[in-house]
Image: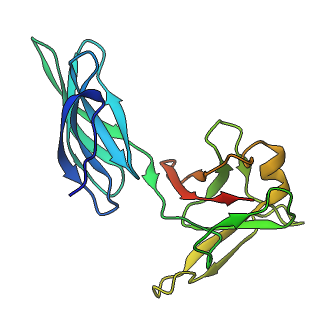
């Protein structure tokens, strides 16, 4: 049993979960209202409410990141659909459980992932783009990095660019991969990192 926490209020309840381990439900806030939440990787995110409503609840989430729920006020109830980023299972530095990076090092950082247009960083809207070959193509290779029998897309990011862009610092403890599928739906994955 794991305590998922609250949105700063007194209580919460989980109402749905997908195959990726993302959980949705409702939680009280500091103001005492209930808001729909998304919980993933140890963090609870407030999904908010529609304009003109005060409370919300999320009842289910599918593997595409679509969340079904409702927003309510004393006089109205509205069915709602939230679209949350698709969680990408990433493996920073495939083959290394420590994910140890030297901040003054040179070379490349590999990330095993499954989306198309990618950045890696700290989610500050200036994240480092995927490295490009001499032919202006993303540096990537298909291989099974975790031995599950399925081919993964392994993409490469320049370590010096991560440092120069401020995405990798001495205090960095995780890196976030952001991208978009061909249909435009967002993709997000993250992994812990140890900087030396």
The residue sitting at 28% across, 54% down in the picture is: 62
- Using the rendered image of the protein, determine whether residue 181 is visible from the camera's viewpoint: no
Does 185 sit left or right of 60 as displayed? right
**In the displayed image of the protein, which residue is found farthest to the front?**
196
**Coloration of the structure image:** rainbow
Quadrant of the image containing the N terminus: bottom left
Q: Position of residue 184 (x, y in %)?
A: 52, 48
Q: Quadrant of residue 71?
A: top left
**In the displayed image of the protein, which residue is found farthest to the right?**
134
Front residue of 51 and 148: 148
Quadrant of the image containing the C terminus: bottom right
The residue sitting at 67% across, 51% down in the picture is: 119
- Position of 56 relative to 76 (above/below): below
Front residue of 101 and 21: 101
Q: Position of residue 80 (x, y in %)?
A: 24, 32
- Position of 92 relative to 163 (above/below): below
Number of numbered discs on residues: 0
The residue sitting at 79% across, 62% down in the picture is: 102
Q: Position of residue 38 (x, y in %)?
A: 32, 42
Front residue of 128 and 81: 128
- Using the rendered image of the protein, determine whether residue 21 is visible from the camera's viewpoint: yes
The residue sitting at 69% across, 66% down in the picture is: 100
Q: Position of residue 111 (x, y in %)?
A: 64, 66
């Amino acid at each position: 049993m794991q305590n998922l926490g609250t949105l700063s209020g007194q209580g919460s309840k989980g109402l749905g979960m997908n195959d990726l381990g993302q959980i949705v439900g409702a939680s009280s806030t500091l103001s005492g209202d209930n808001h729909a939440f998304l919980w993933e990787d140890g963090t609870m995110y407030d999904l908010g409410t529609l304009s003109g409503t005060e409370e919300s609840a999320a009842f289910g989430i599918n593997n595409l990141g679509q969340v079904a729920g409702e927003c309510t006020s004393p006089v109205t109830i509205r069915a709602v659909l939230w679209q949350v980023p698709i969680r990408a299972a990433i493996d920073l530095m495939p083959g290394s459980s420590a994910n140890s990076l030297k901040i003054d090092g040179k070379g490349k950082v590999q990330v095993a992932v499954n989306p198309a247009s990618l950045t890696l960083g700290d989610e500050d809207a200036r994240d480092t783009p995927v490295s490009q070959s001499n032919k202006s193509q993303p540096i990537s290779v298909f291989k099974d990095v975790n031995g599950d029998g399925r081919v993964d897309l392994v993409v490469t990011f320049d370590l010096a660019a991560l440092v120069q862009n401020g995405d990798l610092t001495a205090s960095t403890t995780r890196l976030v991969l952001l991208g978009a599928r061909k249909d435009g739906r967002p993709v997000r994955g993250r992994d812990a990192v140890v900087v030396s």
